[in-house]
Amino acid sequence: MPKLILVRHGQSQWNLENRFTGWWDVDLTPQGVAEAMAAGALLKAKGVLPTYAFTSLQTRAIRTLHLALEAAGRLWIPEVKDWRLNERHYGGLTGLNKAETAAKHGDDQVKIWRRSFDIPPPVLEAGSEFDLASDPRYAGIAIPNTESLKLTIERVLPYWESAILPVLASGETVIIAAHGNSLRALVKHLSGISDADITDLEIPTGQPIIYDFDGAAPVGTRYYLKDA
């Protein structure tokens, strides 16, 4: 039975520093490297071996994928990178410390920006230090200046339907190494989670989540591989 493996990247430097990251490219910490390698070792130990891989265009997800695949002995499998699996764009919050932002704007406002379904943060101003207009990986892409989870879903799901699901339905075991919010978008869709309830879902770093598939349809509920 084909399986879908979802892995949120390991701890990044800005996770450690408690900063809003979004589309800004930040590398893994040593702990993040260890988490990625442990995820791959778990895949190998459980015999859940991916045959096809997808990831975003962001270093922390790409490195997590490669470290996990190396630990699982599967570094050679086909791999596709696409911006539509990128993290949610945090707009004008990018780079800010979360605790300092809460102190300035209030916990309730920051919770709305972070966890509401359809209210995006303030926009990132053009020309700011975190403007990605000159980043070659996004040449020809309409880079968002902010995103809610709803807007993130609107780019993730069409890509899932057109690019990832056909590979899975063909019998491949697919691994997606991505980000908290791009993976929340997929889990919301696959598990039928409501707009209200998705605000409470947290995707932990480096812990493979599994969906079993029958053709193009998930079978049963999602589970953590460590619990299988």
Image: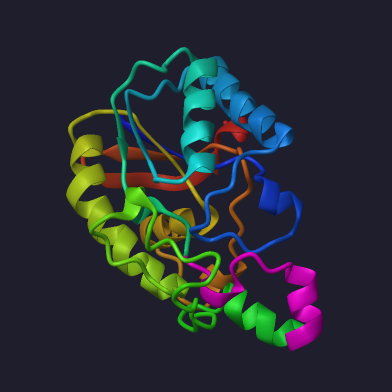
- Tell me where residue 38 appears, x and y as whole percent: 64, 25
Which scheme is used to colour this image of the protein? rainbow
Q: Nearer the viewer, residue 137 or 157?
A: 137
Question: In the image, what residue occupies the spot 60% across and 73% down?
Answer: 93
Numbered label tally: 0
Q: Is residue 216 above or below residue 64?
A: below
Q: Is residue 75 above or below residue 113?
A: above
Magenta span covers which residues?
Answer: 89-106
**The N terminus, quarter of image:** top left
**The C terminus, quarter of image:** top right
Question: In the image, what residue occupies the spot 73% across and 87% down?
Answer: 105
Q: Nearer the viewer, residue 148 or 133?
A: 133
Question: In the image, what residue occupies the spot 51% across and 32% down?
Answer: 63
Residue 91 part of the magenta-drawn span: yes
Q: Nearer the viewer, residue 30 or 148?
A: 30
Query: Is residue 69 among the parts visible in the rendering?
Result: yes
- Tell me where residue 64 appears, x and y as whole percent: 53, 33
Magenta stretch, overall SS: helix
Q: Is residue 34 above or below residue 206?
A: above
Residue 96 part of the magenta-drawn span: yes
Q: Left or right: where does residue 190 sit relative to residue 10? A: left
- Tell me where residue 100 appears, x and y as whole percent: 79, 74
Question: In the image, what residue occupies the spot 58% across and 62% down?
Answer: 201
- Tell me where residue 148 appears, x and y as whole percent: 46, 75
Q: Is residue 159 above or below residue 88?
A: above
Query: Is residue 7 among the parts visible in the rendering?
Result: no
